[in-house]
Amino acid sequence: MRKKLAFLFVCCFLGFFAQAFAQFLPEEVAERPKWEEFLKTAEIVGQVQLTGPDSVTNPWRLTLSKDGVTNDAIWKNIEGMQKGYKEGWKYEIAAYLFDKYLELNMVSPTVEKEFRRDRGSAQWWIESEMSLKTKNEKNIKTPSIKVFSWNRATFLHRFFDNLIGNEDRHANNIRITKDWRMILIDHSRSFRTSKKFTQELIYTEKHKEGPKLMKELPRAMVEKIKALNHDVIKGFVGDTLDEDEINGVLKRRDLILKEIDKLIKQFGEENVLY
């Protein structure tokens, strides 16, 4: 009886442990090539443009259908200076490609797709329970069993936004699934190249809202950014980023590694890297 209970405990613990770091689940990640192909080739059977204060870039919500499968996608073709910000639909694709390289698994499949004779990005629509904005406004508490994984997901999104230089991460583009996984959307204001985004990180103890550290990170992901160089990045992002944007990533990578060293000295390696 004791052996049976111990076995059940281990199974439950390992199940929780596996879920603690997963955003898109392994079975969903395995489906990504299929959904990338679907986004590229499915027929557009419905369309509506999203407007209003929460849809600054006025993207389109497209309904796609192929071989009996129907799913929506967010399509953008915004490019250049808009309302004081540099926007780029290709950055949506580059962010997804970085997500894949890092095995972050927090960004939906995103590909190039033509719509109304224009090139743009199409991102797989994820049905979420709410945004972080809604969570905050309604003071919805994170379930106690999910606090550990939610905190680690928060550290991961800070790491990701630091690396890609995303100046537009706000509470409405952090989506929360019914089972409390964090999904990141809207990366058209990423991959900045100015000194503001290549000499300083967005999330550190100096954040304008107070200290926002990358306190706990997967060791494997840190090793992956150590291996980054121009050719590696160019190899997986293709023409979605130019030379200056690639160099900007590498400069931020160096800043991230310095920040991680600082955190390790402060908290201990065993408490920072897992």
Image (tube, grey):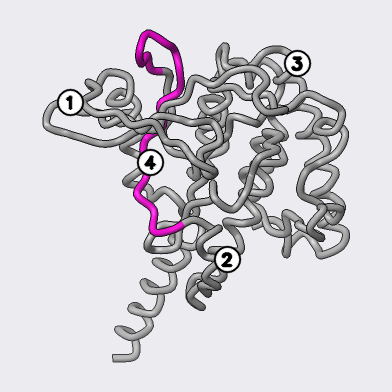
Which residue is painted at 30% across and 23% down in the image?
37
How many residues crowd around disc 1 within 10 Å: few (fewer than 14), some, or many (20 or more)?
some
Kindly identify which residue carries mark 1: 66
Kindly identify which residue carries mark 2: 136
Q: Secondary structure at mark 3?
A: helix
Q: Secondary structure at mark 2?
A: helix
Q: Quadrant of the C terminus?
A: bottom right
Kindly identify which residue carries mark 4: 29
Specify the amino acid type for callout 3: Asp
Earlier-in-chain disc, 3 versus 4: 4
For the record, the magenta segment spans 113-130
* In-image side of 3 versus 147 (left or right): left
Earlier-in-chain disc, 4 versus 2: 4
Question: Which is nearer the eye, 233 or 73?
Answer: 73
Kindly identify which residue carries mark 3: 244
Marks 3 and 4, how far apart in space? 30 Å
Magenta span has 237?
no
Residue 165 at x, y percent in the picture? 71, 34
Numbered disc in front, either 2 or 1? 2
Which residue is painted at 26% across and 36% down in the image?
71
Numbered disc in front, either 4 or 2? 2
Specify the amino acid type for callout 2: Asn
Residue 209 at x, y percent in the picture? 79, 58
Earlier-in-chain disc, 3 versus 2: 2
Marks 2 and 1, how far apart in space? 38 Å
